[in-house]
Structures are given as C-alpha cells and as structure tokens.
Image (spheres, rainbow, N blue to C red):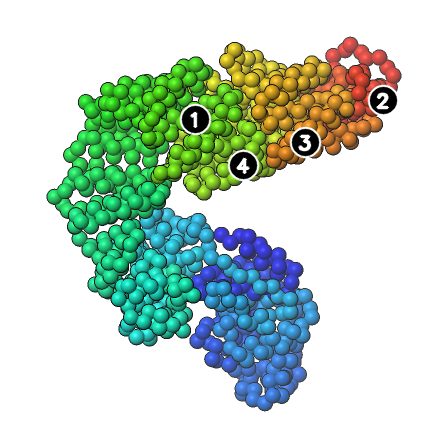
Amino acid sequence: MRSELLATARAELAARRGVLLHGPAGIGKSALVDALTADATGVVLRCTPSDEDSELPFSGLVDLFSRVPDGSLDALPSELRTALRSALLRGPEPESSRDRLALRIAVLDVLRGLAAAGPLLLVVDGLHALDSPTVDTLAFALRRLDTVNVRMVAAERVADGEQPERLGSCPPGTVELPVPPLTDAEVSHLVHHRVAPDMPPAVLRAIRQAAAGNPSYALELARAALVGPPPPDAWPALRVPRRLRTRLLDRASTLPEPVRNTLLIASIACRPTLTLLRAAGVTCPAAHLTEAERLGVASADADGAVRFGHPLVRAALQADASQSRRRQAHALLAGVVTEPVERARHLAWARPYDDEETARTLMSAAESARRDGSLATAGELAGLAARRTPADRASDRAERLLAAAAFARDAGRAEEARHAAETVLSESDSARRRVRARLVLLRIAGPNPQAAPALIEDGLRDAEGDPQAEAWLHHDLAVRGLLSGDLREATRYARHAVRRAAAAGDTETRIGALATLARVRALEGEPSDADAMLQTALALADGITAGPGTRRLLRARASLALDDGRVAEAREQTGPLLASLSPFPGVEEVLESSVLLTRVQARTGQCREAVRTAARCADTAPGSARALYAAALAATVGGTPEEARRLARQAVDASEADGDRLLLLHALAVLGQAELLGHDPRAASAAVEALQRVRRIASGMRAAGPPFLHWQADLAEALVVLGDTDEALVVLREARGHVSHATPAGVLSSLERAQGLAEAGAGRAREGAETLRSAVHRLRALSLPVDLVRTLISLGTVERRSRRRSAARAALDEALETATRIGAVPLAARARDELARVGAASGEAGPSLTPAEARIAELVGDGATNREVAAELFISVKTVEGTLSRIYRKVGVRSRTALAHAMAFAVIATGAAVDSGDDGPAKPPDQTVTAAQPGRPQSRRAPDIRR
C-alpha cells in the first residue's frame, strides 16, 4: 500500500533537502515517516511531539537532541554551550535575546559538526505540535545550513483540503507531499491483513464508507466490529468505539441539546438538507449548523445541503445517541421523505419488530430499486422485509428471502445471497422453493463439478415430478457442464431442460436451454445443428419480453456469428443485446455481454473501443476471471505485450480456481497470442506451452469449432518462431483435418498465415511468401483488420529475409498504416521494428536466416554446446541439431569453428536478412561470409552438428 507515494517521497528526498508529508489525523503519515527513516544512513535525530507538548518550551529540541553526544556540545564556545545546555534543561533557561541568538547559533554549529562526519537526517513526526521556541530555532538553523548532508523528513497534521503552515521550519526547497486517503481496495486489504481475514462483506462495506480512506479509523472500526454480538440492522452496521467517538465529538459535546438533536437527525438522513430538517420539525436548522460549523463538526453549503467534517462523524453521532432517540429520528424522517427506498428504510428502522405493513413497504421499495438497476439495494431491502415479516406468514418470508438471494447474487454479493438461500433451505417446506434456493447456491458455487455435489443431488430429488423445477435445474446443470468442459453432460442436461420446459409451458427456460445447446454443438464443430437450434429459439422468442433466457439467446447468436466469421452480423447484434439489459441488469448479465462486446471489438479492429469496454468489465466485476480475460484480450490488440501477458496469466489462474475450463481455454489462447507479440524464442516458448495446453484440453473436450483452428494456427506460428518447423507442419496437418466447406474464411486465412511462415522457416521462402500473399488476398475481402495486419507483418518479414526489400517495405508500410488507424498498438510496434530491419539490412550481403536460426547461430558461434543452446532457447536438442544443419547449408560451412568465423563477418544475430542490395531472386550463399573456407567447394561430408 502507498508504494507509489513512498517511492515518490524517496526520490524527492534523494534530490532535495527535505520532504514534508501532510494530511488529516490517522491518514498514515507516521507509517510513511517510519519507512523513510528506515532507509536512512548516518545519524538520525528524531522527535515526535504531541498536542500536549506544544506549550512546553524547547520540548521538541530536547527530544531532537537526545541522541546528540555530549562531545558535540563540549566542542562549542562557552557562551554557545551554556545557551544550548540551558535549552536542553541542563542549565538555566535562556532569557535575553542574546541568549536566544546564542542558542540558535549553537544548534546550527552542532548540526554542521554532525553533518561534517556523515549524513544527518532530522525527523519531526508532528510538526503541527512542535513548540514555538523549537520551531524558531530550527527555522534559523536550517535556513543557514548549506550542506546537502543534512536532510529532513517531517509530517504535519492539517485538515482535509488545507495546506501545511510550518513549511518554514523545514530546509529551503522542501517538497510538500499530501497523503491521500486509501482506496476501498486498500482499506479492505488493510482490514483483512491486520484485523480479520473473514470480515463479513456488509460490515466491511460499512467500515469503508465510514472510514473514508483513513487507515486509523478503519482499523479501530474493524476491531470494534469483532467485539460482542452483531450490531442491529440499522445504519451504521458497525460500532464506533468510545475512544473514537470522544476524539470525533469532543467539541460537539459542548453544543446545546437542540443543536445535537439537529445533528443526529441530519446524520441519519441519507441526503440531509435544511429543507428536510425543517420538514422534520427542526426549528432554526441554519442557526444550529452555524454553531456546528464553528467547531468543525458539520455545515450547510450555499444550496442548503448538510456536510459533515468527516463521514465517520455521522456514525459517531448515531452511536453516541440512545436507541430511542435514533428511532424517533427515523420516524420523523419516514414521515417526510418521498423517495421510496429511503422512506422504507426509515420506516423499518423506526419499527424494529415484525410488521407486515412495513415488510410490504420494504418489498415495494426493493422492486423499485431493482427497476432502477440498484440490485445491491434491492437485495438489502428484500432481506430487511423478510426480517420484518410476522412469524405466521412463513411463505411470504420465504419468497422475500428468495428475492433477496436473487438480487444479491445478481449484484455480485455472494455472501448475502448465500445466507438468504441457506435460510430458505433450513426453514421452507416447499420443494420448489428449495430448488430455487439451491439454484442460487449452485450459481454462486460456479462450474467446478466438485463444488456442490450434494446441492445437485438434493435439488434433483426436490424437483422430481415438477416439470418447471426440473427444467430450471437441468438447464443450470447444462451450463455447468458447458463451462466445466463436459460437453456430453451439457448436451444431455440441455435436452432434458428443453423437454421439461416445453411440458411446463416455460418458454423462457426453453429458449435459454436451446441457446446453451447451440453453443455446445458449435463447440463440437457442428455449426448447422447449432444454427437450427438458434432458429427454433428465435421463433419461440418472437414477441415475448426479453428475460435471462432470451438474453442468453442473443449472446449465443452474436458469439456464433463471430466464430463463424460473420463479424458484421456479430457487431450488429451486440447493440440490441446491450439494450436488452436496461430494465435491471445483474453483474453476471452485464459482464457476459460486455466480454462478448470486447471480443467483437477486438476481432473487428475496434482496438481502442475494446480497451474501453474491457475497463467497464473490470469495473463491473473487479478481479473476476472473465473481466481479466477481457482486459488481456483488449491489451493484445490495443495495449502492450507486457500488460497482455500479465493479465492473461491472471485470467488463467482465476479460470482454474473457478473450475471454468471453457474460459480457461480462451485465457490460455490469449496468453499464447500475448507471448507471440514478443516474437522471440523465449516468448515463443511460453506461447507454445500455453497453446499446447489449449490443444490438449480441447482434444479432451472433443471441441472442434472455428476458435480451436485459430488457436492451432497460433501454435504453429509459435513453433516456427521457436525454430521447430517440423512440429509446426504436423500441427497444421492436424488442423486441416478439421477443415470443411463450412470453415470460415477467417480461419482459413489464419491457417494460411501459419503455413506460409512454416514453409519459409523450412527454407522454402518463395513458397511461403506466395501462401502469405494468398492469405492477404483472402483477408482483404473480410472485415478482420487485426488478422490482416498480422499477415502483412508475416509477409513483410519473409520478403525481407528473402532480400526482396521493396516487397517487404510495401507489406510492412500497409501493416503499419492499418495498425495505426485501428489503434492496434502492439502490432504497430511490430511493424515499425520490421521496417527498421528492412532499412538496416540495405547494402549488406550474405545468407538469409530466420530469427530462430540467427539466435542459434549466434550462440553456437559464441561456443555454446547444443544442450546449452536448447536450455537457453527452451527447445529440444533435436530441434537444435536440425536447425544447425539448415544454418550450415545457408552459410556455406560444415563445422562449428567455421560458423564462428562466419559470424565475425555477417550480421545475422538480429534475424535480419543479410541482403544483396536488389529485389531479384535469392542468390546462393556468398563465400565472403565463410572466411574459414574462402573459395573452396563444399564437401559432401556430413556437418558436425552433434555437440
């Protein structure tokens, strides 16, 4: 935490003579001062004054000089020594102006003496509380110290938004660094690591809201939350310890009773204003707020809105009031506010007992919140309604709990959803309600087949004989099977769900099950079956209001269109999909649709838009596997290779943790693509590792849809970069075994790109270039600019290595222009690198080596054995031997020694072609690069490649 601020402070302290950290009490200044002090070398003089010390003359100087050896004082002239000893309570207090001047000069001389012996750091943690005589003395000395050996670290407490007042007590040039509040994520991290790793989410949210980024407040609230029974269900859902209340309300305790009552009502109101306070029966609220403002407790702005000095003041005021006074305040507000949610909350807190009227009001407010898209609020209100439901209305209570569970789950609040669903399981005698509760728990558990076997077994038993309940459960199991990679189970359960939903007349579930079945058939490489199922589902959906099943259908249509290369259709369908989310979208719905949109944008060359959409995914579900996958995918087309690799690795880890094998495939494929952006042996080795996993997992799933052919093309390309051309050709032959008349043109172009690179890597550069030109021609007719750029870069690279620089430059120029236009940042960088190599190669002569061959030649030329080369480049010894044979043929040598001599005369380590200077056919290797054997014919004896 605060690593960036600490790094800035360290850099500033190294470049300047002082750093002054400032901010409100408890914000973390002392922790930063301690971290900076821990780095210090030499002498450290430190004082930490408190407010009580500020009236004690020279108390700060006494603390600061406590570690100064007596020898430093004894070396002073008599008059200066006497003055300093007096200030340090080792003699009478200096009284005359001459004595005070002597003291200041004495301090200056002591500091100079210490600095002459080595670095000196002055630390004042609490500059605001430093006594005035010490402030004046330090200011005098520090203005006159001209050595860089003396530095200062200080911290000053200031109110929010204010500037420090004691910069003059620091060395000239001291930099001011405000210490900002912690983010919500940082507060959560602090609480989990310092207090309780399992703090309930609702309490943690209340702590974050009340602490407002102040780490000291957050820790005190968290510790208090662990003491005693859970707090009542009125805000704040936490305790404010007396010590903290005393500190915050010390001044407020002196206010008259009517003013304190006004502040209590204002603290309980969601959006307190002077108008609201007057409506609640408060007389003269403006005058009351004026008194509170004088003490820094609260104030009213020009628009009449009431603002508190800190959010925790609101919680402290409520915690300090009796329960009866809080109820009265809630009752007053419930009678005057008009907003349904706020009114329902005040009513519930004013009546903390079973009451059906209150429960109905709360459920009505929950539905209102859901329509507004506030699912978390809807879940909270529905849960509160269940708690206010009388004991003789068990069915109403169960329905309200199920609503709370569904709302909370859709809002991404798993703990609240789990608690509500488990309460239904323990209380309800309705089999259908228990099935609904188990569905919530299954969706929280995720796709891992080992996560909840008992839930599935018990759910199937409860659903037996109820076609609609069976349809719900079987469809959920189909989705779990799909995500966990068990396509056979997914097919079986989806078909069951379709039949049972039809029997129950549940069109929405039937549509959703057909959409899931279509996805399964598409993954199995049966697009015609998938399309037929989608057409059936579309006919059923015609004219009905969009629900979860219909939105699943829309996502399936767009996804299948994208995979089939119908990118324009996929792009058109994402608009209606996102529009259909408007009534009350849940986190899962928004995330799934946004991830799909990111895929469409990345595929269609809307690289900048893909990055923005991926950022919205991260906002919707921070740290989730799907959000990480979307961010990694967007980074491969619109970010940086480093960012793409980092995010893709995180997405892989998160997918494995969730048991989502389908997403794991996508995340591994993106990791492979991200590594390929590096286009060097190390990155290619990592790409091969990721994409081989894709190959194995897809084979185990019996998956054969278009995306898997794309990923096999990427695997072949990575193998070529790694120098393993033979294995790349094997992969491509395997992929072509799955090609049919229905294979999308985009997939064929990817396979052609990999085939062209493999042919060139095997020494057939002209054939490789021809294959790549065919892929370029195919892609020009498609709306796949990212694929076009990748293929143009591959073509330009092969042409360059074949010494056809004009053709290479034309392809790379087009690649750079297209990549720049669509915002494909990493591909634009690749194109620039290749263009630079074209320019660097002009005028040179010699053999043409691939990057993998060039790197092996460099290592062998430096004396590395085959095993050492294999270890360095993450390839097999057999691959090194095969590649070395090709290098010998190209360079015109037959031994490692001759290759080493050749390396001294040819620039081949970069992978750039050693060009002849024209665009004609490739020439045989020029003997000038084989200095060890000038002008001699080549022997047919096998070259030495075994070392």
Q: Is residue 674 above or below residue 365?
A: above
Is residue 614 visible from the viewing direction of this image?
A: yes
Q: Position of residue 40 (x, y in %)?
A: 59, 61
Distance between the alpha carbons at the discs numbered 3 and 4 = 19 Å
Disc number lying in front (3 or 4): 4
Q: Residue at x 47, y 22 (%)?
A: 561
Sequence-first tag of 2 and 3: 3
Mark 3 residue crowding within 10 angstroms, few (<14) / some (14–19) / many (20+): many
Q: Position of residue 631 (x, y in %)?
A: 51, 36
Q: Is residue 578 above or below residue 704?
A: below
Q: Do the residues under discs 1 and 2 have CB atoms within 8 angstroms?
A: no
Mark 4 residue crowding within 10 angstroms, few (<14) / some (14–19) / many (20+): some
The residue where tag 1 is placed is 662
Front-lying residue, 106 or 558: 558
Marking on residue 9: none
Disc 4 is placed on an element classified as: helix
Marking on residue 928: 2
Is residue 720 visible from the viewing direction of this image?
A: no
Sequence-first tag of 3 and 4: 4
- In the image: residue 125, left or right of residue 826: left
Sequence-first tag of 3 and 1: 1
Q: Amino acid at mark 1?
A: Leu
Q: Residue furthest left?
A: 392
Marking on residue 609: 4
Q: Position of residue 202 (x, y in %)?
A: 32, 49
Distance between the alpha carbons at the discs numbered 2 and 4 = 52 Å
- In the image: residue 297, left or right of residue 435: right
Distance between the alpha carbons at the discs numbered 1 and 2 = 55 Å
The residue where tag 3 is placed is 816
Sequence-first tag of 2 and 4: 4
Q: Residue at x 62, y 56 (%)?
A: 11
